[in-house]
């Protein structure tokens, strides 16, 4: 059963790896299928663009998880509940903005490059983490908390030993959603000079070249599906632990 569950993600990882290793052969194969006026192909190796994309997702994801958990824990505590509405409104505003518009607003402040893209991606990824952290921590059965207090447990131990473990699946679901959003949103980073697989999509649109578009879009889609499957497996393991 365990092998069967890992087969889909393993097959997709293998497919993505083959595409990165044999990117030029894949490109030639795609040009044989699609008739285009120009067949310039990608000037930058696909592996380089993939690495840039992955780096943006990982860095922005780590920052978003750290901030999201901190905010979620704060507004679910007795000290921060009065600030909950204010935090939620600010974070929702960032999520409501289209990612392209968010990037356009950040660029005049920090300039072109990866810094602006990372700021926009962090803002865009915060909401699912904050909401799920808050929902998970406040959704713990009060009877469990009261029983722990009756046993003489301090608040910090109640949080680390009871509330956080019971909320872990809900929190991980928010991180999973945030990660998938970030993988796709990072394609727009190419518009502000941050590189990544979005470079191929942008160049493909400019040149009316479907091959370049697919070279960028397929790895992004595979990354998103792989991340989703892996996070679901982690959630499943936690639920049975």
Image: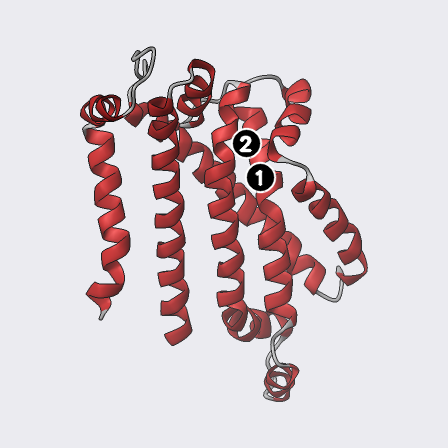
Looking at the rendered image, the quarter that the N terminus falls into is: bottom left
Where is residue 17? Give x, y as percent: 23, 37
Task: Give the color scheme: rainbow, by chain, secondary structure or one colour.
Answer: secondary structure
Displayed quadrant of residue 147: bottom right
In the picture of the structure, the residue carrying the numbered disc 2 is: 118
Q: State the residue lying farthest toward the front.
A: 35
Front residue of this view, candidates 48 and 152: 48
Question: Residue 48 location in percent, x, y?
Answer: 32, 24
Q: Residue at x 62, y 54 (%)?
A: 130
**Secondary element type, mark 1:** helix
Residue 193, x across and y down, in percent: 51, 18
Left or right: 208 as drawn, with respect to 29? right
For this view, does 176 lie left or right of residue 39?
right
Residue named by callout 1:
122
Q: Is residue 175 visible?
A: yes
Task: Tell me which residue sits at (55%, 48%) in the image.
Answer: 66
Q: Secondary structure at mark 2?
A: helix
Q: Are marks 2 and 1 in contact (CB under 8 Å)?
A: yes
Name the quadrant of the C terminus: bottom left
| Residue at the (66%, 53%) spot, across then down | 71
Q: Which mark is residue 4?
A: none
Q: CA distance from mark 2 to mark 1?
A: 6 Å
């Amino acid at each position: 059963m365990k092998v069967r569950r890992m087969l889909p993600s393993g097959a997709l990882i293998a497919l993505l790896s083959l595409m990165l290793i044999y990117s030029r052969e894949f490109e030639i194969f795609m040009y044989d299928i699609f008739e285009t006026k120009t067949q310039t192909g990608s000037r930058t190796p696909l592996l380089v663009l993939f690495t840039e994309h992955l780096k943006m997702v990982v860095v922005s994801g780590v920052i978003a998880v750290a901030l999201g958990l901190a905010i979620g824990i704060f507004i679910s505590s007795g000290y921060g509940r009065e600030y909950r509405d204010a935090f939620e409104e600010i974070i929702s505003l960032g999520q409501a903005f289209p990612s392209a518009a968010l990037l356009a607003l950040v660029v005049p402040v920090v300039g072109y490059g990866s810094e602006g893209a990372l700021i926009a991606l962090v803002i865009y990824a915060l909401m699912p983490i904050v909401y799920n952290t808050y929902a998970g921590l406040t959704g713990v059965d009060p009877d469990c908390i009261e029983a722990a207090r009756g046993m003489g447990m301090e608040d910090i131990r109640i949080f680390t030993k009871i509330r956080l473990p019971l909320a872990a699946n809900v929190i991980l679901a928010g991180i999973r959603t945030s990660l998938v959003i970030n993988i796709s949103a990072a394609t727009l980073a190419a518009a502000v000079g941050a590189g990544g697989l979005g470079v191929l999509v942008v160049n493909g649109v400019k040149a009316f070249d479907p091959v370049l578009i697919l070279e960028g879009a397929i790895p992004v889609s595979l990354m998103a599906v792989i991340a989703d499957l892996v996070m679901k497996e982690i959630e499943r393991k936690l639920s049975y632990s």
